[in-house]
Image (cartoon, grey):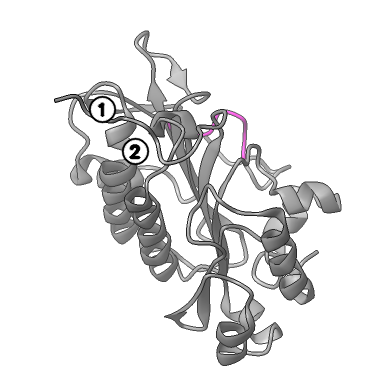
Amino acid sequence: MSTDLTLPRPVSPPHVVRLELDTFSGVDRPALAKWFGALFTDLLAPLCPASVAELVSVARDYVPSDTTPWGPPGYARLLLSSGDFTFSTWDAALSELPPFLRVQLVQLDSQGLPLVDGGWYAEVMLKDDPEFPHQIVVAASRSLFGGWISPVTQQEWLAALRTGAALVRASGGWITLDRVGVRTAHEVAAGVGIDESLFMAAELARGPHWATLLGPRQVAALGGVQEVCTAAPCHLAEHLGGGRILLQLTEHLDDVPPEALEALAAFLQPVLH
C-alpha cells in the first residue's frame, strides 16, 4: 500500500520561522540553560540532517567595547557539530562566559561550516544590566519543515514562547514567518532603527505578528488585561500572568491574510512606533 505524502496545501518557497523574546530583567542562567536545552532538543535537533551535538566554544575571551553596547564583532559563538547536546554542557558554557554575553548556536554543514541559509540558528544576548535590552532569538528555514509547518510543530513553538516569556519576564516577543534580518517588517516599513526598537521594547511592541507577546507596560497602555483579551482582533488571546498577553492572530502560522495583520496593527497602534 502506498503512502499519500500530499501536503494539505501548496508548498510556497522556503522562508524563515522566527521566535524572539526581549527583556530588561536579570536572567537566571541555569534556568535559561535548561529552557534553551529543551528548545534545542524539541525544535532544532530534529531539523538537523545528522545527529547534532558537541558544543565547541569559539572566541570566548573578549572584552566588551567602550564604543558600542553590542561589544566587538568577535562575540562568543557556540557551534554545533556531531555528538550529544546535553544540559550540563550548555549550562557550563553559559556560566563560563563573561557577564556581557552574546552566544550564537548555528547548525554546521557537512564540511563543518556554519549553515544559516536553509538551516537554523539560535542566539542569546545577555548583560548584567537591567536597563540593557536582552534578546533570545531562534530561527529556522521553512524548507527544513518540507515547506509546511505542521500544527503540532506550531504548538511547540508557541509553548516555547510561553515558557520562555515567563522565565525571562519578557517585555515583548513574537513568532512570525517570512522574516529575515534583525528588524521586524513593521520596523522596516516605519523606518525605525534596531537600537531604538530594542531600548523601547518595554513600552512599544515591535510590530504585529502571527504570535505577538505583549509585555505588562504595553498591555496597560492598551487598556489592561481584560480589555486586550476581549477586544484584540485575533484567533486567541491568552493571559500568561504578570500582565503579559499572548495574541495568536490566526489558527495557522502559514495562513495569515494581510487584512488580519492590518486589523491587529490598528489595534496595537497606541504601542507601535
Q: CA distance from mark 2 to mark 1?
A: 9 Å
Q: Compare residues 53 and 231 and report the one nearer the observer.
A: 231
The image shows residue 229, relative to residue 59, as above or below, that is below
At label 2, counting other C-alpha atoms closer than 10 Å, the crowd grade (few under 14, some 14-19, many 20 or more) is: many
**Percent of width and height locating residue 269:** 78, 72
Q: Is residue 23 visible?
A: no
The residue indicated by pointer 2 is 44
Contact between labelled residues 1 and 2, with CB atoms less than 8 Å apart: yes
Q: Which quarter of the rendering shows the N terminus?
A: top left
Q: Which residues are magenta?
A: 71-77
Q: Which residue reaches farthest left?
A: 1
User: Is 127 situated left or right of 178 in this image?
Assistant: left
Q: Compare residues 89 and 262 and report the one nearer the observer.
A: 262
- Residue at x 36% of width, y 61% of height: 159
The image shows residue 96, relative to residue 224, as above or below, that is above
- Residue at x 69% of width, y 83% of height: 222
